[in-house]
Amino acid sequence: MTYDDLRTAIRNWVLANTSNAITNIIFEQENGVRPPKPYISVNIITNTQIGWRDNGVTNVSGIQSVFFNEDISINLNGFGAETYDELGSLRTSIQKQSVLDTLRASGLAVRIDNSITNVAFGLSSSIEPRFVYDLTFGIGNSSTDDVSFINDVDITKTITT
C-alpha cells in the first residue's frame, strides 16, 4: 500500500461515515490555508512493522517476494463543536461489518480503537472546540528483493587435501 493509497482510503472512510457538514478533510503537514470549520485533519503518526517478514520463493531471475504486516497509527483532529459527533460517527462506523469490509477492500483492517478526547484550545479570549480520535489500522504490504544468483564461476585453483 502506497502513501497515496493510504490517504485515499482514510479520506473515503471519513467522508462516507460523517454528515454532509464535514466536507473538508486535510492531511497535516500540508501547506495552505485551513478550511472553514467544521473540518477534520488527519495525521499519520507512525508506520511500524509487526513481527518478521516472510520471504517468498526466489524465482529463476533471482527475485524474491517479501511480505510483511504493518501498523499505521493515525490521529483525527476535529475542529469545531460539531466534530465531536462526527468523530463519534466514525468510531461507531467501525462496529459495522459493511464498513469493515469496505476498509478491508481498501487494504486496511482496524486493529486498535481509542476514545475521543476533548482537547479544547485557548485562543486569546475564546476557546476553540477541538476533539481528537486516535486509532490504528493494520495493513499487509509486500516488496521484492533482488537476491540474484551466481551464474558462472571460474575456478582458477584446485585445493587438495
Image (tube, rainbow, N blue to C red):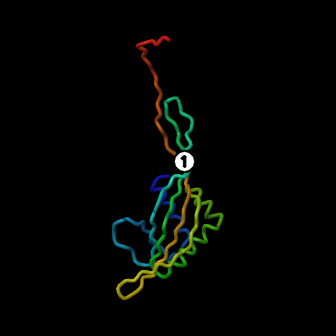
Q: State the residue position of label 1.
A: 68
Check the image and name the residue furthest to the front.
161
Q: Where is 6 relative to 83, above or below?
A: above
SS of the residue under disc 1 = strand
Where is residue 126 drawn, in percent x and y?
A: 39, 87
Between 140 and 118, which is closer to the camera in this rendering?
118
Check the image and name the residue furthest to the right.
97
Where is residue 58 drawn, in percent x and y?
A: 54, 33
Where is residue 89 drawn, in percent x and y?
A: 57, 74
- Dividing the picture into quadrants, the one containing residue 88 is bottom right
- Dividing the picture into quadrants, the one containing residue 116 is bottom right
Where is residue 83 drawn, in percent x and y?
A: 50, 78
- Dividing the picture into quadrants, the one containing residue 108 is bottom right
Which residue is painted at 39% across and 74% down in the image? 35
Which residue is painted at 59% across and 58% down in the image? 109
Which residue is painted at 54% across and 66% down in the image? 135
Which residue is painted at 49% across and 73% down in the image? 132
Between 52 and 15, which is closer to the camera in this rendering?
52
Amino acid type for the residue under numbered disc 1: Phe
